[in-house]
Image (cartoon, rainbow, N blue to C red):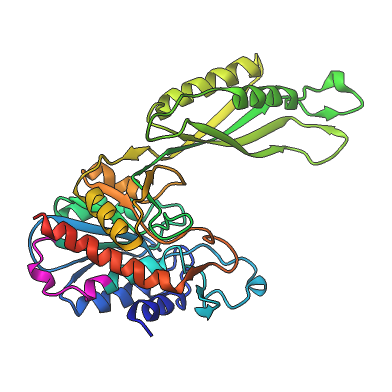
């Protein structure tokens, strides 16, 4: 059994649903400690955060990852237990197989394959959290100041999120869109449906607002980012009775936005639409900005990732900013070049999550060669 397969299995077998780490970070610390890495526990509340730093001097490559996973859902539906790593049909199955315990194992094993790690000419860091799949408040967001104090300037950040689409390395992420959510409420007056004159139904006003919201063209995007998009995610009233006119109607929606729009400009436009459709009746809106958009300009890390993936797969990766948010958004403002490169994401967050067995060794080999490519330029 290969070292990367064995370590991936060991990590999957540790149930680590957010914010529980399940002992994954201790296992990784043990492996890297044997290579001379020092470790810093940066726990926040129930969340485990851990920074590991290699011996040596030079610019810093930070590998960013998370040990937490999403809940497995109904375990009886899985073909094999979600927290029991199982090989079947050329795949390794288990929660976290693709997102992202395989990436963690691949990077640790890549480090174990390096000769004289203290003399590489670059430093290697590994920053882990158990709060990526959850609120992401006590994870990487909370430890960036401590990270800077302990590690110094971060030159490059390689995020092990499952970026690949159909085969390993066909897609990498060079940034991500921003995420702005809102909960809006339109108020009226409850009443009996048979006596509408004594009631004021807010649903038609909310419906008209949502129609206008859905028809809004927010921006054009740019060469690296698609246009800002909106999705309505929830509708509700304050009554479930068929013979009561509701006194409150509410909706939730999310805007994934390009840098061509700002969170403030989006808020202003939405609030103008609320005012237009609420009329003289009361309304309210609560906002939550979970991510600002970011993108890294091509630098040494991009050159290394492109070169290594092409050497291993024969194809140069497509670089884009698609997908959801990632913890890379907390590292980019520190001045690091950030790139996401990890396994195929076809099964992430699904029943029977899996990764191809031959993808594990290939990913670890890529990570090793990316480290060596960066070391060559120092």
Q: Quadrant of the C terminus?
A: bottom left
Front-lying residue, 299 or 37: 299
**Magenta stretch in the rendered image:** 110-122
The quadrant where residue 113 appears: bottom left
Q: Residue furthest right?
A: 194
Vertically, is 186 above or below 179? Answer: above
Front-lying residue, 5 or 210: 5
**Residue 116 covered by magenta stretch:** yes
Residue at 24%, 67% in the rendered image: 368
- 365 horizontally vs 232: left or right: left
- 89 horizontally vs 162: left or right: right
Q: Residue furthest front?
A: 314
Front-lying residue, 41 or 313: 313
Q: Quadrant of the N terminus?
A: bottom left
The quadrant where residue 111 appears: bottom left
- Residue 28 in picture, x, y percent from top left: 30, 74
Front-lying residue, 192 or 373: 373
- Residue 36 in picture, x, y percent from top left: 15, 75
**Residue 378 covered by magenta stretch:** no
Residue at 41%, 58% in the rendered image: 131
């Amino acid at each position: 059994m290969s070292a990367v397969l064995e370590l991936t299995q060991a990590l999957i077998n540790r149930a680590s649903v957010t914010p529980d780490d399940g002992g994954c970070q201790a296992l990784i610390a043990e492996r890297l400690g044997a290579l001379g890495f020092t470790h810093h526990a940066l726990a926040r509340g129930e969340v485990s955060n851990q920074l590991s730093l290699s011996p040596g001097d030079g610019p810093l490559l930070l590998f960013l990852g998370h040990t937490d996973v999403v809940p497995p859902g109904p375990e009886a539906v899985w073909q094999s237990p979600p927290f029991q790593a199982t090989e079947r049909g050329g795949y390794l199955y288990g929660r976290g197989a693709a997102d992202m315990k395989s990436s963690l194992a691949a990077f640790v094993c890549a480090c174990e394959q390096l000769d004289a790690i203290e003399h590489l000419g670059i430093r290697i860091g590994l920053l882990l959290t158990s709060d990526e799949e959850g609120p992401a408040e006590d994870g990487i967001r909370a430890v960036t100041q401590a990270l800077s104090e302990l590690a110094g300037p971060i030159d490059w950040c390689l995020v092990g999120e499952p970026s690949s689409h159909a085969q390993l390395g066909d897609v990498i992420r060079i940034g991500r869109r921003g995420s702005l959510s809102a909960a809006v409420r339109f108020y009226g007056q409850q009443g009996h449906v048979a006596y509408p004159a004594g009631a004021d139904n807010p649903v038609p006003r909310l419906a008209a607002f949502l129609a206008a919201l859905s028809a809004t063209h927010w921006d054009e995007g740019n060469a690296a980012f698609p246009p800002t998009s909106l999705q309505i995610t929830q509708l509700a009233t304050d009554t479930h009775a068929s013979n009561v006119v509701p006194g409150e109607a509410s909706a939730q929606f999310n805007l994934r936005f390009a840098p061509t729009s700002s969170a403030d400009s989006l808020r202003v436009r939405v609030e103008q639409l609320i005012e237009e459709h609420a009329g003289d009746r009361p309304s309210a809106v609560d906002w939550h900005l979970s991510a600002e958009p970011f993108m890294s300009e091509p630098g040494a890390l991009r050159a290394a990732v492109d070169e290594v993936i092409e050497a291993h797969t024969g194809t140069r990766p497509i670089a884009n900013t698609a997908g959801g948010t990632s913890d890379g958004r907390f590292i980019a403002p520190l001045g690091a070049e950030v790139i996401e490169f990890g396994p195929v994401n076809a099964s992430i967050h699904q029943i029977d999550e899996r990764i191809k067995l031959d993808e594990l060794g290939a990913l670890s080999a890529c990570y090793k060669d990316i480290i060596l490519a960066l070391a060559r330029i120092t």
